[in-house]
Image: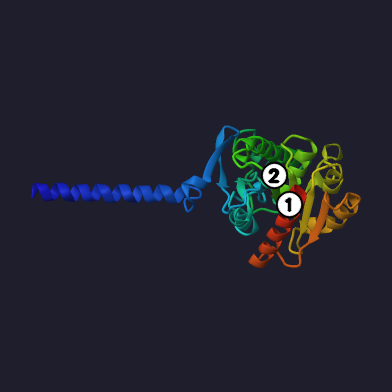
Amino acid sequence: MVQLGRLSLLLIVTVSLLMAMASVKAQQPYAYLSADEIKFITIDGKQSEILVRSWQSKKHFGSAVIVAASDTDADAAGLASYLRTNINSLGWASISLTPAKGLYRPNYATKPEEITKAGTEQLQLSSDKSIPKYESSQLLELRNFQQTNLNEALNQLPATTSLFPGGKIMIVLDDSAGMIINLLYEKKIPTPDVLVIINPYREYEYLIDPQSQRKSIAEQLVTMSIPILDIQSADAHPNSIEQATTRLNYNQVKPARYYRQYQMSLDLSNASGWEEALNQIEGFSRTVIGR
């Protein structure tokens, strides 16, 4: 009886430990991925995940850094995740960065004291309240916070990209594209061999005091000597769609090798559109890098 009691106790403890381990694993980001894909960098004193997938073919062309829209994650559903897991078979290792958090939404009311100080939690939005806009100083503080995080993250990536010799592509989406274009314009982050911008925009720049506003995306792109593929889809943010013509008009003075705008025939809300975008990225990158 004593031995049976010990066995029962051991079984209970074992089951409890397994349940606890399963619970911890479920709470971990990217628990569904192989541990080999998950790496870490430090941003503002805290760990942040990057997802790294090596080449999946005999072709070894280099690496592609992917940054999805803000307030998503390194494996953002849709195009970002598709590129992360499908560009490898074309000869490019993928390095997916956790995007900046704290996307501002001026159509919600937020108390001034909810704006964070450096190193603390991001802006908390009171989504059940309406309508007044943020002040310029609030938007500027949050914009700078986001860009500082991206700056710190991107400057830590060369140690990872160096593991995959060859060309370096940077693929940036939506509002993250707007922020990273500014960091490249200000020469604060390493310059890639190819820059791919997908539906780039800056949503509330006009609400910031004029002296603190950045040049437009079109004006910043035209000064860059990086080969740029500008992909625009019909289901993009309205600001990106509205400014696509201006981006093209400013940059069509460049040779085709240094600027190409591609208007998607499909939306990026479906897998066929993702494949179309990847085909354009592969073709442009291989033409530029000569592989």
| Left or right of 15 in this view: 252 | right
- Circle 2: element type: strand
In the displayed structure, would residue 273 be above or below residue 54? below
Work out whether residue 43 can be spotted.
Answer: yes
Instruction: Looking at the picture, tell me which residue is in the foreground, 111 or 29.
Output: 29
| Left or right of 240 in this view: 43 | left
In the image, what residue occupies the spot 74% across and 43% down? 193
Contact between marks 2 and 1 (CB within 8 A): the answer is yes
In percent of width and height, residue 151 lies at 69, 37
Q: Label 2: how many residues lie within 10 Å, few (<14), some (14-19) or many (20+)?
A: many
Q: Amino acid at mark 2?
A: Gly
Report the disc number at residue 209.
none
In the displayed structure, would residue 194 be above or below residue 90? above
Instruction: Looking at the picture, tell me which residue is in the foreground, 138 or 62.
Output: 62
Q: Amino acid at mark 1?
A: Ser
Q: Residue furthest left?
A: 1
| Left or right of 162 in this view: 14 | left
Instruction: Looking at the picture, tell me which residue is in the foreground, 233 or 103.
Output: 233
In the image, what residue occupies the spot 83% across and 56% down? 244
In the image, what residue occupies the spot 47% across and 54% down? 32
In the displayed structure, would residue 264 be above or below residue 218? below
* Residue corresponding to mark 2: 167
The earlier-in-sequence mark between 2 and 1 is: 2
In percent of width and height, residue 96 lies at 61, 47
In percent of width and height, residue 160 lies at 60, 39
- Circle 1: element type: helix
In percent of width and height, residue 249 lies at 90, 54
| Left or right of 225 in this view: 86 | left
Report the disc number at residue 285.
1
